[in-house]
Image: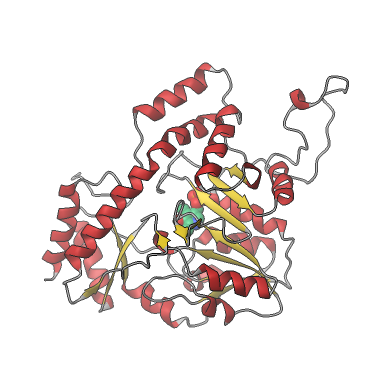
Amino acid sequence: MKKMINIFQPSLGKKEIEEIKEVFESNWTGKGQKTKILEKYLSNKIRVDRGNVTTVTSCTEGLFQIIELLSLDEKDEVVLPSISFVGAGNAIVSSGAKPVFCDVDCRTLNVTAEHIEEKITEKTKAVILIHYAGLPCEMDDIVDLCESRDIVLIEDNACSPFSKYRGNNTGTIGNFGTWSFDSMKILVIGDGGLIYCDSKNTMKYLKEKLYLGLMSESGLTNSIDKKWWEFNISSAGRRSIINDITASIGLSQIKKVDSFIKRREYIHKFYTNNLKSLDWLMTPEDFPDYIKSSYYMYWIQTKNSTDRDDLARFLREQGIYSTFRYYPLHRVPFYNNKQKLENTETAANSTLCIPLHQSLSNEDIEKVVESIKKYKR
Ligand SMILES: *Cc1c(COP(=O)(O)O)cnc(C)c1O
């Protein structure tokens, strides 16, 4: 088969293998020293205290765990943009609460405080938002809204691992944040994620809940005047911890991630500069200077929705993969939601995400641009 230009792709190599080798030689592959160091590096990078974060098996599991902490039931509602990752919708449904899908801005695909406010009722307990493609939402207004209504604010930060809004890392602006390090994300550790919580006490409880509810890390941390095999639990927790093999990959990736984001930024600008003159499509608008994107996705929007679908097929024939993220949840039959969300519909019918990752060569990105121009000048 002819080589396909991927939309996302991890950059893993010798350095990661060297880190893994150390884990093999240590005779311990479970959660241990490497995971501890990774949590320390990540908390430093997003400039929060080590006691406010924990690693977790995936971002999806992080969302489930956070929602469980809120003890919701069928009388409660959680507002989220319809253009969200399916795991967020599932976490709400499985808690028994009702997901309430809201609209987004049709150019940025981000929610604003107004879109959220339209859906708030006295039953609203939480909001889960995403920073689409790495571009931070207007957080000042959203934080004010949630604080004034006593609503828990959760940031699904999978797209925006090191994005900044007015100097603060996204994911640390609300009450909770979750990151993803799966194979399609910017920083890849295999599978895994990070959770931030603004309360250290809640984080302590959550960390125990991620490991069977156990209240001490291992028998070795109990003093020897006790019988160290005795234990207590603080919750009926599951097992949602990462391991040192996975964490060791992260130790190498975290050293490279700034250069990944730099290359992604270059490609983002290259696409915009080379595509903005085409009058049948729209490129992302310039970002405001008080934000910093992680450049997770690059998206174009066609003025005519048949162009979007035809272009996607044309690019695929040319060996270029493209897709639309995230298919609106209110259109997913399972959620049985029949409302109309005008901007969401418009965005979902016109938006196409094209390849953006740090391993794309200049030749690759020139081919992407040339192929789009070949489709229509
Ligand atoms: C990938 C992704 C997730 C899920 O991350 P996992 O670590 O694979 O569970 C959640 N939200 C968004 C926006 C994502 O892109």
Total numbered labels placed on residues in the image: 0
Horizontal and vertical percent position of residue 155? 55, 60
Viewer can see residue 99: no
Horizontal side, residue 1 vs residue 32: left or right: left
The colour scheme is secondary structure
298 over 1 or under it: above or below:
below
Residue 107 visible, this angle:
yes
Residue 184 in the figure: left or right of residue 198: left
* Quadrant position of the C terminus in the picture: bottom left
Q: Position of residue 84 (x, y in %)?
A: 49, 65
Residue 192's spot in the image, x, y percent? 52, 43
Q: Is residue 91 left or right of residue 266?
A: right
In the rendered image of this protein, does residue 19 appear above or below residue 305?
above
Q: Residue at x 25, y 76 (%)?
A: 306
- Which residue appears at 51% of the width and 61% of the height? 86
Q: Nearer the viewer, residue 78 or 167?
A: 167
Between 352 and 361, the residue placed more toward the observer is 361
Q: Residue at 45% of width from left, 21% of height from top?
A: 21
Quadrant where the N terminus sits is top left
In the displayed structure image, the side of residue 134 where residue 156 appears, left or right: right
